[in-house]
Amino acid sequence: MAVEKKQILNKLYLLTGFLFLFAMAIIYKLIEIEHFEGDLYRVEAEQGTVKTFEIAANRGSVYTSDGSLLATSVSRFDVRMDAVTISDTDFEEGIKDLSVALSEMLGKSAGYYENKIRKARINKNRYLFITRNLSYNEYQRLKKFPIFELGTYRGGLIIEQRTVREHPIGKIAERAVGYDDYRGRVGIEGSFYEFLRGKKGKRLKQKIAKGQWKPLNDNNEIEPIDGKDIITTLDLKIQDVAHHALLGQLEKFEADHGSVVVMETKTGEIKAISNLGRTSKGTYFEQRNYAIYESHEPGSTFKLMGMVVALEDKVIDTSEVIDTEKGVIRFHGKPVRDSHHGGYGEISASRVFEVSSNVGIVKIINKHYGENPEKFIKGLERMKVGQKIGLPIKGEGEPKIPQPNDKENWNGLSLPWMAYGYGVSFTPLQTLTFYNAIANNGEMVKPRFVKEIRDQSNVVTKFEKEIIHPQVCSQETIDKVKEMMLNVVKRGTADNIYDPNFSMAGKTGTCQTEYWTDDTKYISSFVGYFPADEPKYSCIVVIHKPNKKKGYYGNVVAAPVFERIARKIYTDTPIEEEVSFDDEYASVDKAYSRYYAKANETFTKMPDVRDMPGMDAVSLLENMGLKVRISGIGKVKSQSVKAGSELKKGETIQLELS
């Protein structure tokens, strides 16, 4: 009995000891959690129910030089409701008026919204969907509705803000404007993203049922800072003219793709750039920025570079007679042919250029540089031909000039072929930059896409003219080649676009591509400037792979685009009128400030948008939930709905532009 009792006590002691050790372990763990791991667990617990969400800042807008919108971030608001947090008194007092207000804004009956919200309250729904994609002005109205006006805690109002990037003028200049998103960083949007993107804000949200998150309060912990605005050099009127002139010609000749660039001669400001590619359905859209990235053999437009080198080296003069024979010569068994059957016979060097004689230019260059091709290459390099421009927009194509010391890529055909634009390669903008230097009496300026960066109405950064080369060649040579380019239009290969009422100068180009296949294609081009006596603008047109049955020479396919652009600019903006930059900037400032002020107002009635730039008016009205149709280009001349009229969601407004 005593033994049995002792055994029972031993088991009891053992159990007591185990329980004591277990209790000590629990106490130790509690102490460890409290003093050593408590902060970690508290953070994890808080993260499980409370989390900081980033609020994207509104990206800055991109404007044309005349103050019209090219790209802008539009705020959109999604609305939900915590149907549980509202007190019974507040709910019953406001539910009917809230339902009526929602019905007037969103369209469905008041009874629909009352039943929906009451059902959500019974089901304890703390994240009831109300509507999405409200504009800023609609959101401001909704915040003042019964119940919602009580705020997040008392009124259960939950707002989710998003930003949407829009291009008010559609696809025009889309590739130059570019984007900065999942597709990468392209164009102006991509190159200036640090200014445009702004700084993100932060907002605390609490996790509720079904994995949903609800904001903890009405205000953000850190407010987002909107990005800065970019004022480009693009002119909306010139851009529109260039786009449609190119589009019409691409459609007419069923071409694969093409580009056009218009540059202001003295400043290098790009006033228009259009890049259109053909789809499988035969339509065209801004597919790639061909003008900047696509390096290709230029063909006869390169003859200007060769002629300038020869004139600078004084190995020829414009009056020197060149025997073009019967329009065909051979190098190592390979023919060089003129487009004119039978050739031109004996003609002057200037006439060689005017009629674009391949035989003539090849004989000039080969005669004087055949024994020393390095001299010709150095002449090109002195003028910065064959060098990248160094654009702020990414993706500039690599120029190519073969080098005599490159044994793998240089042979007996390299120099003759180079003379008329084969074996070398440039982008359209690189070619235009050289022609612009000739138009600008030798000063080569860097093409510029952006005038300035602004924070609201304050100028943050201003971009000035950059000079690549102060004088590419002598004034004597410039005067000679200018006369030759004028004669190209008067009596040369581009005489089909000659007009005695306004002067143009330039050079045609026709280059074979895919000539190694059974189906040779062509690249048609024209590059020049206008007016010829006092150049204001330079312009290049390049059209790839037109339908050969309809035409492929540069004078037929590309030159008419140049002529249409020049004619339209002459008609709409007479060159003789000088406008100071101070006046231009003041005009842009005024338009910008007016738009910014209106965009931040809350409208309950139709605003007066007359005299606003058309694209600004479109952005403003569409943000108010209205549909807009426009006719014309420029500023708003009239609006179909009078200012002060009651606003109706979804109503269509017709704007007539000047």
Image (cartoon, rainbow, N blue to C red):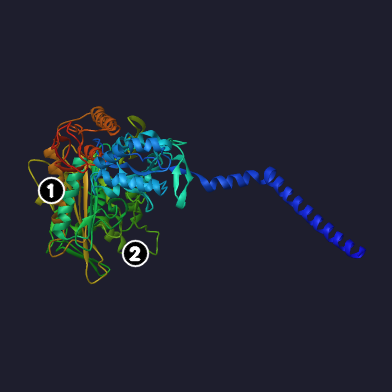
Q: Secondary structure at mark 2?
A: loop
For the residue marked with disc 2, what is the amino acid?
Asn
Question: Where does the image place residue 32, in percent across and percent down from the top left?
Answer: 70, 46
Please indicate whether residue 516 sits to the left or right of residue 490 in the image.
right
- Residue at x 46%, y 36% (from the top left corner): 222
CA gap, disc 2 and disc 1: 35 Å
Query: In the rendered image, which quarter is residue 252 located in?
Result: bottom left
For the residue marked with disc 1, what is the amino acid?
Val
Residue in front for this viewpoint, 39 or 621: 39
Q: Quadrant of the N terminus?
A: bottom right
N-terminal label among 2 and 1: 2
Instruction: Specify the label residue 538 is tagged with.
Output: none
Instruction: Specify the label residue 411 is tagged with.
Output: 2
Please indicate whether residue 24 sits to the left or right of residue 306 in the image.
right
Outermost bottom residue: 518
Residue in front for this viewpoint, 462 or 214: 214
Q: Quadrant of the C terminus?
A: top left
Q: Using the rendered image of the protein, determine whether residue 622 is visible from the camera's viewpoint.
A: no
Q: Is residue 366 above or below residue 232?
A: below
- Front tag of 2 and 1: 1
Query: In the rendered image, which quarter is residue 195 located in?
Result: top left
Question: Where does the image place residue 531, in percent across and percent down from the top left?
Answer: 16, 40
Outermost left residue: 500
Mark 2 neighbour density, 10 Å: few (under 14) some (14–19) many (20 or more): few
Q: Is residue 192 above or below residue 370?
A: above
The residue beneath circle 1 is: 489
